[in-house]
Amino acid sequence: MRVIVTGASGLLGSAIYKAFKNAGHTVLGLANSRATGELQKLDLLDSQEVEKVFGEFHPNWVIHCAAERRPDVAEKNPDGTRKLNVEIPLHLAQLSKSLRFTLIYISTDYVFDGTSPPYTPASITNPVNLYGQTKRDGELSVLGVSGARPVVLRVPVLYGPTPNNADSAVNILLDIVADQSGKQYKMDHYATRYPTGVEDIADFLVRLAALPPTRPIPPILHYSAGEPFTKYEMCLVFARILGVPHSHIIPDAEAPKGDAATTRPRDCQLYTRETEDLMEGYGGLGWTPFEEWWVEYLNKKQ
């Protein structure tokens, strides 16, 4: 199979690129600001160049990971975020129609408002911040192209191997826990998250691509690990693994007030039964427990 991965230098994209290559597929990894090594530099806003690259490669699947994924950055640059998160996916869906490839659009649990979890693929979206709004609008744009072959894959907060812990809202907590300088950190103990490993998502997508035609993929899928944590609770796990004190991390169980921070939903748990049923006999969801993954990963790095 011939696969294009956009955002292939990012946390999720790099894991997906590696997994499909290891599975023996022909993979083109695209990146823009961090196009190094095997990755091809491509500005996805350059529609003519995108059409040229895609037309020459003839992909069977395009997995679209490139996006503005930082809610606080999105609020400060709404126009740029809409271009990345809405206009580019629309163009890729139009190409999906003309070039006849399956488009996997990576979306987020933040398309929901967090007031009535768990959310099924059919649940009504109601994003509470600009990031969630643009990802929801991206979903609508790809699903609205008649004749295209889109699949929306919603995922929660992600973690995994990365050279820079700041690339993940979960990995960065490791640095905070390890900081024993005496600095104190106020840590969210209000919002419940379901941290999910990018390697698990990548493995799931490889298996999804191998499903027989008798198992058609629905237009919206949810993939999520099943363990709930607040950010403070993740920090406690890291402190236990690292064997360091955590008294410098102060739990904050108050709901965010006013405009002090970008609004975050409280609990956007993704209901995954449809995905589990789809993958029955093909490895199921196959997610790794949070602490188990981190223990193994950190032991390898020592």
Image (spheres, helix red, strand yellow):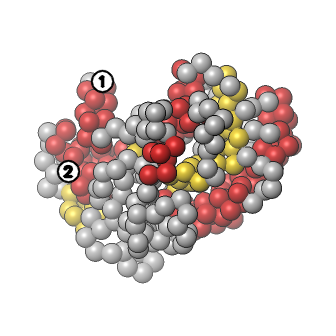
Q: Between residues 41 and 264, which one lies in front from this camera angle? A: 264
Give me the C-alpha separation between circle 2 and circle 1.
21 Å
Name the residue carrying label 2.
Answer: 236
From the top left corner, tell me how far across and down residue 281 is, in percent: 46, 33
Q: Where does the N terminus fall, quadrant-wise?
A: top right
Crowding at mark 1 (Cα within 10 Å: few <14, some 14-19, many 20+):
few
Which quadrant of the structure image shows residue 200?
top left
Q: Specify the amino acid type for callout 2.
A: Leu
197 left or right, relative to 10: left
Does any portion of residue 21 appear in the rendered image? yes
Residue drawn at (13%, 47%) of the image:
245
The secondary element bearing badge 2 is classed as helix
Name the residue carrying label 1: 300
Residue 72 seen: no
Residue at (81, 51) in percent of width and height: 147
The quarter in which the C terminus is drawn is top left
Q: Give me the residue at 45% from left, 45% from top.
A: 276
Residue 193 picture quarter? bottom left
* Pick the front one: 217 or 145: 217
Q: Relative to residue 22, is residue 32 drawn left or right?
A: right
